Amino acid sequence: MPKHDFPAGFLWGVATSAAQIEGGRREGGRGDSIWDRFAALPGNIADGSVPDVACDHYHRWREDVALMKWLGLGGYRFSIAWPRVFPEGRGRVNVPGLDFYDALVDALLEAGIQPCPTLYHWDLPQALQEAGGWGERDTAEAFAQFATVVARRLGDRVRHWTTVNEPWCAATLGHEEGKHAPGRCDPAEALRAGHHLLLAHGLATAAIRREVRAAQLGIVLIHCPAHAASDSAADRDAARWFDGFFNRWYLDPVFRGDYPADALADRVALGHLPAPELPCVKEGDLALIAAPLDFLGLNYYSRAVVRAGPHQRPVDARGAPPAELTDMGWEVYPQGLHESLLRIHREYRPRRIYVTENGAAYTDRSDARGRIADARRIAYLRAHLLAARRAIADGVPLAGYFVWSLLDNFEWGFGYTKQFGLYAVEPETLRRIPKDSAFWYRDVVSANAVPDQPAPQTRGESRASEP
Ligand code: IFM
């Protein structure tokens, strides 16, 4: 295989999530999610925005499917809004909510695009939050009901399922650091939330397997290689700490059926646990969580560089110059994708891996002719694809890659200030405008290879056939 080619059948896609693009907050019988409530509280979202309309994908989904068809994609990773299907979180099914996803799935299949739904991308029904949210075990049981109903409705056409997206973010940012909905700052609750999110994954895995015999199932974990700022024993221990807290806390239960002993001990040292065990773990939970999966979805953006800090917690010691940071302040570090893929393959042995998210936030304005020349995004994607390609050559069973994201969208606590899209979304009209990266990615997909250099003349021809 030539150096920059990908294997035949490699799945090229883009990823989005419901709360970030759909809008249609009060339409079709949808209930509120924790993000609707969280965003409405002053000070929670950087630009004071709310996701009520977002990219208006709820009304423009046909157009968005056409964009994906034009890109030539093989797969689309999207999420199913739990409060659209169960406005109260459990009990009564909202049939128009299911109809929405049913029609989307049909349109994708007709366009030759494999639908790859994620069941939980952080939009917990507000009604369940009022009953205790992820701090309560019942929420995981309600999620299994949601998974069953969705799998029953879509399972005749959808093969590729993921349960939960980035449980670390939902548990830690949402319950320990208060930066995400529901805005809680309670480490003990965050630990319970993390476990119940994994339990939800385990219960949903069993439910989907019951409903869809041919299902290909996975969970999506974010992975961030932890590097020590120096070779000192204290800094190396800080890197171990961060790896346990961020990466292994989820990888170990899913692939080994246990929480990492050293990370449990770290939580004891912090005073978050009385003993190195989680009191909320019940008999049988870990076996459910570790049930065999068909693949792991890996989200990769950057690495962490840490040094020993006070109060048992490492501190951020990133030293990259501003030119090497994206608008999120994340270092552009493509070799970290190669490192993550190899590490996970060697230590956890998932049957297959998909890069379910990778991308960069950069603000690029359109020029007088309406062109958005996002050269930095192209360079980021290109470097990461080459890193992924090297991982395949090194034996990693990497089966696909999804760019985050199709559209500039509601970036959680940052509102609309961080732009990850291959397409810009004009704020006043919500018109989708392709960036240069959309043309570039289209060339990658059609060649099943990373071109040596961006080819402007090809880009010119492509523009003519833009939908
Ligand atoms: O926008 C998010 C996405 O919802 C989850 N993964 C990280 C992305 C960028 O922050």
Image (spheres, helix red, strand yellow):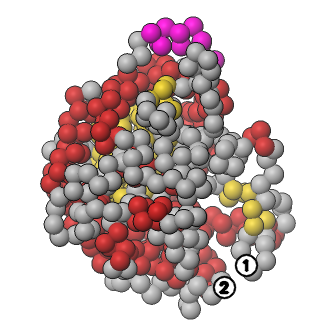
Q: Position of residue 201 (x, y in %)?
A: 35, 64
Q: Is residue 12 above or below residue 221?
A: above
- The quadrant in which residue 44 appears is bottom right
343 horizontally vs 152: left or right? right
State yes or no: residue 188 in magenta: no
Residue depicted at 79% across the width and 77% down the height: 310
Mark 2 — residue?
269
**SS assignment at label 2:** helix
**Can residue 422 be spotted in the picture?**
yes
Mark 1 — residue?
312
Amino acid type at image mark 1: Gln
In this figure, what is the number of numbered marks? 2
State yes or no: residue 463 in magenta: yes
Q: CA distance from mark 2 to mark 1?
A: 7 Å
Of 386 and 112, the residue lying toward us: 112
Q: Is residue 208 above or below residue 437?
A: below
**SS assignment at label 1:** loop
Residue depicted at 46% across the width and 70% down the height: 182
- The quadrant in which residue 7 appears is top left
Marks 2,1: beta carbons within 8 A = yes
Q: Position of residue 231 (x, y in %)?
A: 83, 61
Please report whichever mark, 2 or 1, sits nearer to the chain's N-terminal start.
Answer: 2
| Magenta range | 452-464
Instruction: Identify the main secondary structure in magenta.
Output: helix
432 horizontally vs 336: left or right? left
Q: Quadrant of the C terminus?
A: top left
